[in-house]
Image (spheres, helix red, strand yellow):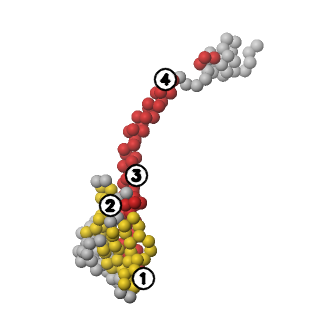
Amino acid sequence: MRERGFSHDQDCPVLGRASSHCAGFTMVEMLTVMVLIGIMAAILTKPVSGAFRASARRTAKREASAYLFRARTIAVQQSRASQLVRNGNILKIRVDSSGTMVQLGTATDLGAAYGVTVSMSSSPPDTITFDPRGFMLTPPTPKLVVTRDAAADTICVTGLGRVTLRSCP
């Protein structure tokens, strides 16, 4: 009499194989799969890590531009001069309080947070000043450059205080 899933001469359920072939994969099959996974990981590592680095640079650029927008907005809202100050990779906002510049909020270290380098071309160096109307007082158009590896993103501020992320004059 035949039970369900078994044959007379074989004792492997359902598959109909001999008992020595019933369980698992062979070592050759397992090694083949492991080698294929390793090759795929090696191929995908560079593009994926490059995407993470580019994403970190873009995020740092957005945060730096947010600091510029915030400095200008504070100048207009409070009718006081404000500054964006860069010290290395650290950005902070200072506001005029009866002739004394006072830091407003917290400083952000973009180098530690995103692994980028921040540089600035302005005069005086490392400071962008907005007057109470939101106009920029720094003479030439300052550029804030966020760099990671070989790629760089630039943020510019026009004389009227407009922050541009795409095209710098």
CA separation in Å, label 3 and label 1: 37 Å
Where in the figure is residue 5, as x and y percent of width and height? 69, 21
Mark 1 burial class by Cα count in 10 Å: few <14, some 14-19, many 20+: few
Q: Earlier in the sequence, mark 1 or mark 2?
A: 1
Mark 2 burial class by Cα count in 10 Å: few <14, some 14-19, many 20+: many
Mark 3 burial class by Cα count in 10 Å: few <14, some 14-19, many 20+: few
Q: Residue 77 bears which disc, if any? A: 1
Instruction: Give the residue at x 38% y 88%.
Output: 98
| Residue placed most toward the observer, 138 or 133 | 138
Where in the figure is residue 48, as x and y percent of width and height? 40, 47
Q: Which one is in front in this view, the residue at disc 3 or the one at disc 2?
A: 2
Instruction: Give the residue at x 35% y 59%.
Output: 116
SS assignment at label 3:
helix
Query: Is residue 96 in sight in this rendering?
Result: yes
Query: Is residue 58 in sight in this rendering?
Result: no
SS assignment at label 4:
helix
Which quadrant would the N terminus be assigned to in this image?
Answer: top right
Q: Quadrant of residue 115?
A: bottom left
